[in-house]
């Protein structure tokens, strides 16, 4: 299929005037991209439910479990390597019509994968999930039950749960204070791109290196006896597991090559398609066995590695820097050799994004509700600087931004590393994406975040400059000692509970149990300092519990789970013969995701103002009102909403409380240590946790009732509470030290599509962004879709299937998120700048 | 008894004698594709609903 536009239409101008960017995209993109984009089975849950037709893949889980049972006497890393190799060798694979890139985490395009050995509670939930069992349903349920029976009690989470402090375990599993699973079975795996994605080595080179290490180690094991050689035996097992799975990975790619060649030689009649299939065959015979030579091979290698990593663990994020690592091949093929036209390259770029968009695994309901519309946070990093500090933007940076507007996927999204040397051309491409309503790229202040990487984790400047988003927000280097092989989502804190517990003596009225420490009956507090002391203790308790759990999970993971494939693509593990998850030699890059954060500042400020300063209400009245969920206290509630200062209005009264909370937390972040003995800074943000936790967080002194949506951002003001305009929002946020006060701070802003139209709109936005940079904020992202369009989409969702919005650290199609989340986005203040 | 090697969808592997792949065309509601899974040529195909005599 050629890269010609799908259709020509004279009404493009009309669509542009109506800001119907999705119709423009459909008409401008090539026939191939149009087919592939529409061919995707959407895996993101709609609200909390999977779309009709989506089925759980049972082929992979059965293959994996069968082989796992067979090798029951092997060490865990070898057992996983053999089971994984069996999946690579036998799972059905497919090649979609018109595609040029291959690889999928499942046996058919409509399937979602299932991590059988992660957590029994997830397995039980899968068994009971309506609508996702393949036909015949009864037979599928029987297979699932058999698999569940086998894994019950021996999944990674089952093993961690058995050794956790029982009280910690109950409180963590209550779902009230945080979420996640302390195992790399569901981690956010950082990738050591500096090792394997620079076009310098393939898996055969890595295998040769490992064989050298084994030979050297074996020499020692037949040498002088002593305690210093005992650890080598385990390392040899680890190396052998890496080789086994890397060889299987090469065979997996060659299965695609064989299928493409069979199709070309026996089944395809179109000569052009035959050529494409033979090119796919040649590509998959080349990578990942050997280093890539061109753009297609580079994309294909990256895609296969991401796919195969997911067969090993249900990776919930997709850290990437595609323009930086694939850019040299784009420039060679398109600009120097001219072996690819720009249009042909656009087809490859678009398909690369579509292949990521279609990936999906089964997630428990809390995860689906917390990340509505997507299956993980594929936040791809673009822009930034090279290790020497020079501008890293290249021709592929702008090509990705242009292509994003043509295919309009909600996952992956881009996060742009802005720095002062970024050209106007690149900024205009970024702005066009926002103007087209994609909600991305988000903007990251690169000099601030490089300094932040150095401040919190001691990464050397050259390594810090390689950073990518490990999940939604937090930067992580891609270097040997800087990359974090995985980060478990279980250090994700529901921070609104800090102030809630400070007001209720550590008791949780929603789940009905004593959760935090008993910090005193707040009715007896006579000044703000007593309340703040209680808040500090609750904050320290909550974060420490989550971090303890993650640290333990991380420490035990090589014993309880094991990552032979990830180890084989991680230089530190290859060099040392360790599981990549072992912290040995890793600098450490942990962070706490701080959900529902801003409620703390607004609530504490409201109590200080109306109870302790103005003495309009007593603590006794406040606690009584909160315990009744403000029922019967509406006038009082409105006072707490309207007569107390709110974050985001450049008001030092509340802004100082925000800074005090952040700095108190930052102090504790340095006390808590990770398995590499490094710090645990917090990154205030929400995915759609502000909706998920709305029924978990009780009434608060900012006037919020149980059930109301929480604030949407990490440092975004409450919806409609930022009344002093966009500059005041930036000034409030600019009071935060974005290097020392935490790891990253998410700021959502809505802009008016009408005001942002044309050159004038662009210049207004540039001026706004200059203020953002001058104030030293580390993050900002925009929604630029009108209320009119969003309300029309609520009324007639079929007509507005392709409208995308920025939810929090990710984007989603508006029709895929719950009504409550939709309303929350509409309620956000549209800033006139 | 029909075996997989008697089927039109069976393609023997040139470099791995005694092994082959079942390659089939699938058209689902959103896309069309070719899918493959490894097959032993001597496997009993009498119960296979997709069997097409070579």
Image: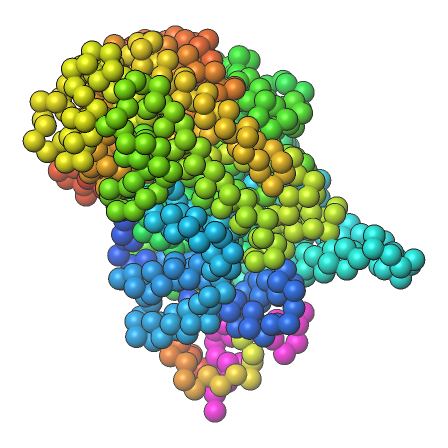
A736 lies above or below A90: above
Along the viewing direction, whichever of A327 and A77 lies nearer the viewer: A77
Q: Which residue is drawn at 37% across and 39% down?
A: A516
Quadrant for the C terminus of chain A in the image: top left
Q: Where is residue A621 in the image (x, y as percent from the top left)?
A: 16, 26
Q: Which residue is drawn at 43% across and 86% down?
A: B46
Q: In which quarter of the image is residue A780?
A: top left
Q: In this view, does A322 lie to the left or right of A696?
A: right
Q: Is residue A617 left or right of residue A25?
A: left
Q: Where is residue A605 in the image (x, y as percent from the top left)?
A: 28, 18
Extreme residue toward the right, this view: A224
Q: Residue at x 41, y 31 (%)?
A: A537
Q: Which residue is drawn at 53% across and 81% down?
A: B5
Q: Quadrant of residue B39?
A: bottom right
A214 lies above or below A292: below
Along the viewing direction, whichever of A146 and A228 lies nearer the viewer: A228
The residue range painted magenta reads: B1-22
Q: Is residue A3 left or right of residue A754?
A: right
A202 lies above or below A126: above
């Amino acid at each position: 299929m050629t890269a010609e536009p799908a259709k020509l239409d004279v009404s493009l101008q009309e669509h542009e005037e109506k800001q119907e960017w999705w119709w423009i995209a459909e008409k401008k993109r090539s026939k191939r991209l149009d087919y592939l984009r529409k061919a995707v089975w959407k895996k993101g849950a709609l609200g909390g439910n999977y779309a009709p037709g989506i089925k759980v893949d049972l082929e992979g889980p059965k293959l994996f479990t069968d082989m796992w049972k067979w090798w029951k006497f092997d060490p865990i890393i070898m057992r996983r390597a053999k089971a994984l190799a069996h999946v690579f060798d036998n799972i059905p694979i497919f090649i979609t019509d018109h595609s040029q890139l291959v690889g999928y985490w499942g046996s058919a395009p409509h399937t979602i994968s299932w991590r059988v050995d992660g957590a029994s509670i997830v397995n039980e939930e899968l068994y009971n999930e309506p609508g996702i069992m393949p036909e015949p349903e009864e037979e599928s349920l029987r297979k699932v039950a058999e698999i569940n029976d086998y894994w019950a009690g021996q999944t990674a989470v089952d093993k961690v749960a058995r050794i956790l402090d029982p009280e910690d375990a109950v409180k963590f599993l209550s779902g009230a204070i945080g979420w996640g699973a302390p195992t790399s079975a569901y981690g956010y795996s950082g990738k050591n791109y500096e090792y394997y994605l620079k076009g310098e080595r393939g898996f055969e080179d890595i295998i040769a290196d490992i064989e050298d290490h084994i030979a050297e180690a074996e020499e020692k094991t037949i040498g002088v006896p002593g305690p210093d050689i005992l650890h080598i035996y385990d390392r040899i097992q680890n190396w052998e597991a890496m080789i086994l799975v890397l060889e299987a990975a090469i065979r997996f790619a060659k299965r695609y090559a064989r299928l493409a060649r069979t199709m070309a030689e026996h089944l395809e009649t179109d000569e052009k398609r035959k050529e494409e299939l033979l090119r796919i065959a040649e590509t998959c015979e080349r990578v990942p066995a050997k280093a890539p030579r061109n753009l297609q091979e580079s994309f294909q290698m990256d895609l296969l590695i991401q796919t195969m990593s997911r067969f090993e663990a249900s990776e919930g994020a997709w850290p990437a820097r595609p323009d930086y690592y694939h850019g040299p091949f784009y420039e060679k093929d398109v600009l120097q050799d001219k072996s690819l036209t720009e249009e042909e390259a656009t087809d490859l770029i678009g398909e690369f994004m579509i292949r990521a968009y279609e990936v999906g695994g089964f997630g428990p309901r809390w995860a689906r509700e917390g990340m509505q519309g997507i299956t993980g946070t594929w936040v791809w990093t673009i822009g930034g600087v090279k290790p020497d500090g020079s501008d890293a933007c290249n021709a592929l940076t702008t090509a990705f931004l242009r292509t994003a507007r043509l295919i309009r996927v909600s996952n992956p999204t881009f996060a742009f590393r802005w720095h002062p040397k970024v050209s106007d051309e690149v900024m205009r491409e970024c702005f066009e994406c926002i103007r087209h309503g994609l909600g991305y790229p988000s903007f990251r202040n690169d000099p601030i975040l490089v300094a932040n990487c150095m401040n919190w984790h001691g990464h050397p400047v050259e390594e810090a400059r390689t950073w990518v988003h490990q999940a939604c927000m937090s930067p992580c280097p891609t270097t040997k000692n800087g990359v974090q092989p995985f980060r478990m989502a279980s250090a994700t804190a529901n921070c609104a509970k800090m102030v809630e517990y400070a007001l209720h003596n550590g008791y949780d009225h929603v789940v009905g149990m004593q959760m935090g420490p008993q910090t005193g009956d707040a009715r007896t507090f006579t000044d703000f300092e007593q309340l703040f002391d209680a808040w500090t203790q609750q904050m320290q308790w909550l974060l420490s519990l989550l971090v303890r759990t993650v640290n333990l999970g991380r420490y035990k993971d090589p014993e309880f789970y094991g990552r032979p494939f990830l180890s084989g693509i991680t230089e530190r593990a290859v060099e040392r013969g360790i599981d990549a998850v072992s912290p040995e030699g890793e600098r450490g890059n942990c962070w706490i995701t701080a959900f529902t954060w801003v409620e703390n500042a607004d609530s504490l400020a409201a109590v200080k103002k109306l109870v302790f300063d103005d003495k309009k209400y007593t603590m006794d009245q406040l606690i009584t009102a909160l315990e009744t969920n403000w029922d019967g206290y509406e006038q009082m509630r409105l006072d707490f909403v309207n007569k107390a200062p709110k974050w985001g209005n450049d008001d030092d009264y509340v802004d100082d409380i925000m800074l005090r909370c952040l700095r108190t937390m930052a102090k504790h972040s340095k006390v808590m240590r990770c398995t590499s003995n490094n710090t645990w800074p917090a990154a205030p943000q929400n995915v759609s946790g502000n909706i998920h936790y709305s029924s978990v967080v009780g009434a608060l002194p900012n006037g919020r009732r149980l059930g109301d949506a929480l604030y949407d951002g990490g440092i975004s003001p409450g919806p409609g509470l930022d009344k002093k305009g966009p500059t005041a929002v930036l000034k409030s946020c600019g009071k935060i030290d974005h290097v020392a006060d935490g790891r990253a701070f998410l700021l959502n802003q809505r802009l008016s599509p009408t005001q942002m139209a044309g050159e004038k709109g662009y210049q207004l936005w540039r001026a706004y962004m200059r203020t953002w940079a001058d104030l030293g904020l580390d993050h900002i992202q925009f929604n630029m879709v009108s209320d009119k369009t969003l309300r029309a989409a609520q009324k007639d969702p079929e007509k507005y299937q392709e409208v995308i919005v920025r939810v929090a650290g990710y984007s989603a199609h508006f029709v895929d998120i719950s009504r409550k989340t939709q309303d929350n986005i509409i309620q956000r203040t549209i800033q006139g700048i | 008894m029909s075996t997989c090697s008697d089927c039109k969808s069976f393609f023997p592997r040139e470099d791995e004698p005694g092994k082959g792949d079942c390659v089939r065309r699938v058209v689902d509601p959103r896309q069309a594709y070719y899918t493959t899974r490894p097959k032993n040529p001597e496997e009993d195909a009498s119960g296979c609903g997709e069997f097409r005599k070579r």
